[in-house]
Image (spheres, grey):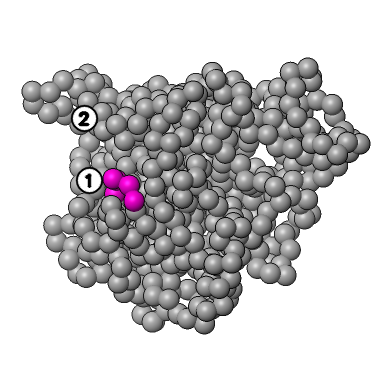
Amino acid sequence: MALSLLPSTLLMAALMFSTVTLLLSLGGAGAQQTGINRHYRFDIRMANVTRLCHTKSIVTVNGQFPGPKIVAREGDRVVVKVVNHVPYNVTLHWHGVRQLRSGWADGPAYVTQCPIQTGQSYVYNFTIVGQRGTLFWHAHISWLRATLYGPIIILPARGVPYPFSRPYKEVPIIFGEWWNADTEAVISQALQTGGGPNVSDAYTINGLPGPLYNCSAKDTFKLKVKPGKTYLLRMINAALNDELFFSIANHTLTIVDVDAVYVKPFDTDTLIIAPGQTTNVLLRTRPSFFHSTFLMAARPYATGAGAFDNSTVAGFLEYQDPNTSSRASFSKKLPLFRPTLPSLNDTAFVANFTSRLRSLATAQFPANVPQSVDRRFFFTVGLGTSPCPKNQTCQGPNGTKFAATVSNISFTMPTTALLQAHFFGQSRGVYSPDFPYSPLIPFNYTGTPPNNTAVSNGTKLMVLPFNATVELVMQDTSILGAESHPLHLHGFNFFVVGQGSGNYNPAKDPANFNLVDPAERNTVGVPAGGWVAIRFRADNPGVWFMHCHLEVHTSWGLKMAWLVLDGSLPNQKLPRPPSDLPKC
């Protein structure tokens, strides 16, 4: 379908709201507004959905799966009233939105807010500043984001063109996972037993598993195209636990944007997209009608030793015959072309693909990479173990429980929201501001793992002065096996200035950093058995979550938070919380 600026059901309401409230200054969104206000209402409701011939009740927004898209232009203010009608506590996160001085709207449970309880509501209020492209929203509590997610489409400011040819149509493509089981029960059981959770039953494209799964031929995403046209595919990986390779048979994709930041265009037959990442690609269709069907397919990139859903989701690319008035429809009699995807653990492909990502770095779209650094950090990321409670049998390694850490600290979630505790000066007993700059006990991170795999636990924050420039190296470890970790930083974009395999060498590796046009992202893969270096400026006061976007690792503790202090000027301070902020 052609892209519209707002879902049709909300268009009239949004226009009326925008007219009335355009000049109002709504609390909690501190950035200067240059656009209009766009209002949405998200009713969190249970709905019956059938996939794989299995019907179950899932958590949805407005009864939709996937959820409705939010569409705005750069400079617009987005106001979303969320009303919780389900028996679960809920929060929503606007993944990748900078949230400049609007940290109260960021959404991770017990970090920036307490959850929205059953029967309660909360208004998320934020402004899109300096971003254009594709992001997404999702639940940010337990595993509810398995079904609670949807696209955020950010168009350029009115009158500002794309830095590439204007596409004929724009199509969101959002990857997800489907469980026949209740995902809340899946993670609850895993945390109780200490073992790995059960894996999903299928991957989905726009909520549909496709013809390679049992009982799913009718539940297949079909992209119907015209010959000789350019389509912008807005790709989102909303899956809980799997990075994915994606390709369309006999077609080339041109990468033009990642994480809502333009990049230097390059062509590829296949892309890699991790949970939490978004990628905009141009698909140029063949100049003449093809009486054929082309398979589009995605399957996992898997590097760890744990179980994963080793299956493939597929959809169809179908050409419309210009000589007929009817659209093409899939027929088993048509020739079917299939793409060739990389092997499941093709780390070389992933390293090569990510190394090709470069910011535009033009006068209009500069790459403001910090050239000097105020704070340098070295964090390890990986797995470990926690002891099994007495009188209990655990299913983790050697009878322990799986844990995951940043710098060997498995993050303990508080029962009071960190941002509230900070703002009101009530941190005692909630968190400590002493997260270590580097591991307390260095070791050969990617070599033979140490005998002691036990982790420490705590709610520790790293404190940064306002406007400090930060360089952070994140190092994967081989403890319980090397594994790729997509790390997501809330509240900031960062520049990926370097990456490599093996152990990071602070004496040699910085000489190869790209400080000219590195990719700017909000989620980056820490390579399996390797490291990645990022830089950012701490110009956004508040408490900002950083965590692995493999949900199982987040559940095991691979997360931490940054506390960015207020600056000296009024527009460098975190505003007071909105009056309807949920209470714990």
85 left or right, relative to 48: left
The residue that appears at 59% across and 67% down in the rendered structure is 12
Mark 1 residue type: Thr
276 left or right, relative to 386: right
The residue that appears at 91% across and 36% down in the rendered structure is 323
Vertical arrangement, residue 439 with respect to residue 32, above or below: above
Q: Is residue 5 visible?
A: yes
The residue that appears at 41% across and 54% down in the rendered structure is 43
Q: Quadrant of residue 42?
A: bottom left
The residue that appears at 15% across and 27% down in the rendered structure is 388
| Residue identified by numbered label 2 | 192
Vertical arrangement, residue 438 with respect to residue 571, above or below: above
| Residue identified by numbered label 1 | 412
> Which x, y percent locates residue 405?
30, 39
Q: Quadrant of residue 73?
A: bottom right
Q: Quadrant of residue 208?
A: top right
- Whole-Å distance between the Cαs marked 2 and 1? 16 Å
- Magenta range is 85-89
> Which x, y percent locates residue 263?
66, 52
> Which x, y percent locates residue 543?
33, 61
285 left or right, relative to 34: right
> Which x, y percent locates residue 451?
24, 24
**Number of marks in the image?**
2
Specify which label sits upstream in the sequence, 2 or 1. 2
Which label sits in the foreground, 2 or 1?
2
**Which image quarter is the C terminus in?**
bottom left
Mark 2 residue type: Gln
Residue 575 covered by magenta stretch: no
Residue 87 covered by magenta stretch: yes
Vertical arrangement, residue 203 with respect to residue 567, above or below: above
| Front position in the image: 138 or 576 | 138
